[in-house]
Image (cartoon, grey):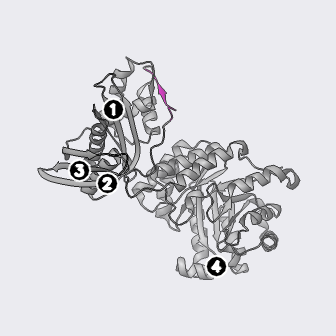
Amino acid sequence: MDQIRISDVTMKQNGKDFTLSFKEKIEIPKLLDKLGVSVIELEGIAQPKIDALRIKSVASTVKNSIIAVPVQLCQESIDATWNALREAKHPRLQVCASVSTVQMEYLFKKKPDAMMSAICETISACSRKTTDVEFVADDATRSDRAFLYKAIDAAIGAGAKTVTVCDATGAILPDELGEFLDDLYEHVPALRSVTLGLSCLNELAMADACAIAAIKHGVREIKAAAYQIDRISLSNVARLIAAKGDTWGVCCPVRTVEMNRIVKQIAWMCETRRSKNSPFDNGVAEMGDEISLTAHDNITAVLKAVEKLGYDLSEEDGAHVYEAFRKIAQRRDVITSRELDTIVASAAMQVPATYVLASYSITASNTSSSMAHMQMEKNGQKLEGVALGDGPVDAAFLAIENILGCHYELDDFQIRSVTEGREAMGETVVKLRSNGKLYSGRGTSTDIVGSSIQAYINALNKITYEEAEA
């Protein structure tokens, strides 16, 4: 029985108001890996520093699925992408090229002969990095058939192990697709030595039907989306294969029992939007204590756990964090994720304060929006900001953003009590992202809003210091 590989393209979709935060781009692949998809496709490198960190972060957390990242048709892009991807357990490089005359000239500014050479050279270069190289023939259904045959044959000869044909308009019907695929196998015998894949848009609401037709005509990898906007639906195809796969002689590794729960989690992240009246990008999600450390763990184990939380520490900061960890671990049986976050916020990257809180005033009510008036100082200059928010912390953070004139992604926000009684102290950890890198700040106060503001400014000062030094 043949296995159908599902290649998830959720993060590559283009849809109205469909945006994901850096943290969500790490969390979604982890969920897809648990779901059992064969391939997880990531966006390529557009902003070198941010995107390379994103790919490295995903590569370090995904254990079973193939991680596929596209490269541009040049050596520089191949090298940069591979350097970010190379630590993945199962890395794949994708060479995407238009094979229709219109797109070749409009998107790539190349004539057919030049495009053929670029495809072969890029795939050969990728094959020297990894044995898993995919050639994605974009707009294949509208291409000149003679050129398409030559391009696919050349790509396989250059080292492509997977060849994906794309219906870039979503206009093909299932029976037409079947004839198209049969024609490919007839004219390109080498296709039988590799995996044939399909990508299909859903313009006519026929993408899922086309996927099933493709399976019946020899396709063994389907590009689908857990959060489906304009692509084949992962859920629908997985259910159809589970129900009828025996009849077709195929199976699929996706765990259909867990599918509804995981797909709903992914949909929540994709559909949650940042309110104009809140600095929170996705709300505050509860963080599970997946990390458990004891006094017996060495510096390697501790820093690996810190990296798992998303931090990229220098060697000096790593040593400071481990020393702080040892002192606390001697008094506690177990150090969890939340406690490790607090240690990093307290011990790593202690810098001079660029921004200093002068005063703040918060007005809150159950009948109207909260209002915050913040006064800060920077190099002796007084700065003020006023903002309305969905709550006191919302308003305070948004007022700080108004002072800064920019928005940092709020990766996490944790609150807990550290003492008991009427004058109980509250501790807050705020994690901000700038250029993909994670910075955390810690604040303590009997006023939880005050501790939140301290934590935010603490993280902000770390960002400001490092970016000034860069």
Residue type pointed to by label 1: Glu
Q: Earlier in the sequence, mark 2 or mark 4?
A: 4
| Left or right placement of residue 282 versus residue 157 in this view | left
- The mark nearer the N terminus, 4 or 1, is 4
Q: Are marks 3 and 1 in contact (CB under 8 Å)?
A: no
Q: Quadrant of residue 128?
A: bottom right
How far is the residue under mark 2 from the one under mark 3? Answer: 9 Å
User: For mark 1, does the 10 Å Cα neighbourhood hold few (<14), some (14 to 19), or many (20 or more) residues?
Assistant: many
Question: Residue, x 46% and y 50% (percent of image)?
Answer: 282
- Residue 310: % across, % down: 44, 42
Q: Nearer the viewer, residue 359 or 88?
A: 359
The image position of residue 311, as x and y in percent, is 40, 41
Q: Position of residue 461 (x, y in %)?
A: 25, 45
Question: What residue is rendered at 69% in x and 70% in y?
Answer: 152
Q: Secondary structure at mark 3?
A: strand
Q: Is tag 2's residue or tag 1's residue first in the polypeptide sequence?
A: 2
Q: Is residue 65 visible?
A: no
- Indicate which disc, 4 or 3, sits on the residue closer to the N terminus: 4
Dot 4 amino acid type: Ser
| Circle 2: element type | strand
Name which residue type carries label 3. Answer: His
Give the magenta-colored segment's residue range.
288-294
Q: What is the C-alpha distance between the residues marked 2 and 1?
A: 24 Å
> Of the numbered discs in the image, which one, if any, rests on residue 373?
3
Residues at circles 2 and 4 in contact by the CB criterion of under 8 Å: no
Residue labelled with disc 1:
427
Q: Real-space Cα distance between discs 4 and 1? A: 59 Å
Identify the residue under disc 4.
100
